[in-house]
Amino acid sequence: MTCKYPRLTFRLLCAITALAVAAGAAAAGPQAYVGNFKDNTVSVIDIGTGTVIATLPVVSGPHGMTQTPDGRTVYISGDNSSEVSVIDTASNRVTRTIEVGKTPHGLAMTPDGRTLLVGVYGDDRIAFVDTTSNAVVGSVTVAKPHTIAVRPDGQVAYIASQEPGKFALVVVDLASRSVLRTIALDKPPRDPEFSADGRALYFTLASINAVQVLDPTSDKIIAQIPTGASPHIAAMFRNAAAGTVVVQGPGELLLFDPATNAPLRSIAVGKQPHWMAATPDGKQVFVTNEGSNDVTVVDLATGTTKTIPVGAAPRKVVVQRTVAKAAAGGNPLGQPAYPKRRAHRLDTSATLSGSRPAPFAGFARVPHGAGPRMSRTQNKVYRP
């Protein structure tokens, strides 16, 4: 800001105004983007104030969501369409629509931000979209691709294939865009998610009240995390003190210890929770509640929550994150392929009693500030 006033008073006024403008710019932080399935809109939430600052019309039946690593672009697929909407986060406007094929479901981004993966459920294929041109540049056949997890090193993707009678996780090589192998499953896979360090793949199965923990080096299930009814998505976010699971039946966010895969505590959220995303520091998780038309913001350390009303039937959510610049000799994100976890202090006053729960035992939801109570739930689990 330039001031050309001769008097000191005016110069001081200009300086104060410039500082105020700079402070306002500095105060601008990450935003959360929530896809409202029944409204065909995206709600934009200012994380600092916890309020909706914009509502954007998007493709019909917003389903999958992802973002570029720099947070400048958000992509959202339309379950009732054949398109993906592209949102510019600087202006919070839809800048274009990409034709990808029938009934696109899950979306995922490569770590370098150059390629968008689209699960084209109706056409039985994964479409590869160049994020510079926003054009489809290739595809690979995968039956009924639902959701997608890209390994943090960017070499492979695990696809939840829901082909009836042939349920599987399909492993795709991203360099050659070809299928490497298939991991057969007894139940339909719902969602796979890599831990931030890439050492574990957490995935859920329909009708199974447990999270499956897979070792990507062997493609073997090495543990199961018992949950309440209908776990949907499980993740170990970067910088988070604990892993988290969205459990739809009881309407809760389950915290677990990633070292032991033991449940720690459950925090009540809204009705029929669907998805989650963490803030860049890993301290808060945004949970969408499809049945109550709102988002629950959970503080992982204290267990306190805040509710933000959004549109009708919110499903997917992404939260902008800060990404380091590329370092010489490193990967495009300036991070080692499998960085060490950084953990914040976690309040474990509401952990389950005992050093480890009985295998696949159920447990009750823990209200804020109360100790847990053990109860029996369905012990039906998938065994590889």
Image (cartoon, rainbow, N blue to C red):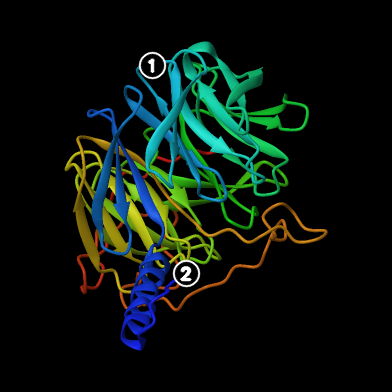
Taking the spot 30% from the left edge, 58% from the top edge, the residue there is 363
Q: Locate residue 300, reporting x and y percent.
A: 36, 67
Q: Locate residue 64, reporting x and y percent.
A: 43, 33
> Looking at the picture, which amino acid does disc 2 mark?
Ala
Vertical relation: 336 (above or below) 347: above
Query: Based on the displayed image, in which of its 4 quarters is residue 348 positioned?
Result: bottom left
Q: Locate residue 178, reporting x and y percent.
A: 73, 24
> Which residue is situated farthest in the bottom direction here?
8
Query: Based on the displayed image, in which of its 4 quarters is residue 355 positioned?
Result: bottom left
Mark toward the start of the polypeptide (1 vs 2): 1
Vertical relation: 121 (above or below) 280: above
Question: Front-most of 70 and 117?
Answer: 70
Q: Quadrant of the C terminus?
A: top right
Label 1: few (<14), some (14–19) or many (≥20) C-alpha neighbours in 10 Å: some
Mark 1 or 2: the one toward you: 1
Horizontally, residue 198 falls left or right of residue 251, namely right
> Looking at the picture, which amino acid does disc 1 mark?
Ser
Taking the spot 34% from the left edge, 79% from the top edge, the residue there is 16
Horizontally, residue 176 falls left or right of residue 269, namely right
- Residue identified by numbered label 2: 241
Label 2: few (<14), some (14–19) or many (≥20) C-alpha neighbours in 10 Å: many
Question: Front-most of 197 and 377?
Answer: 197
**Residue 81, numbered label:** 1
Horizontally, residue 367 falls left or right of residue 126, namely left
Taking the spot 61% from the left edge, 52% from the top edge, the residue there is 200
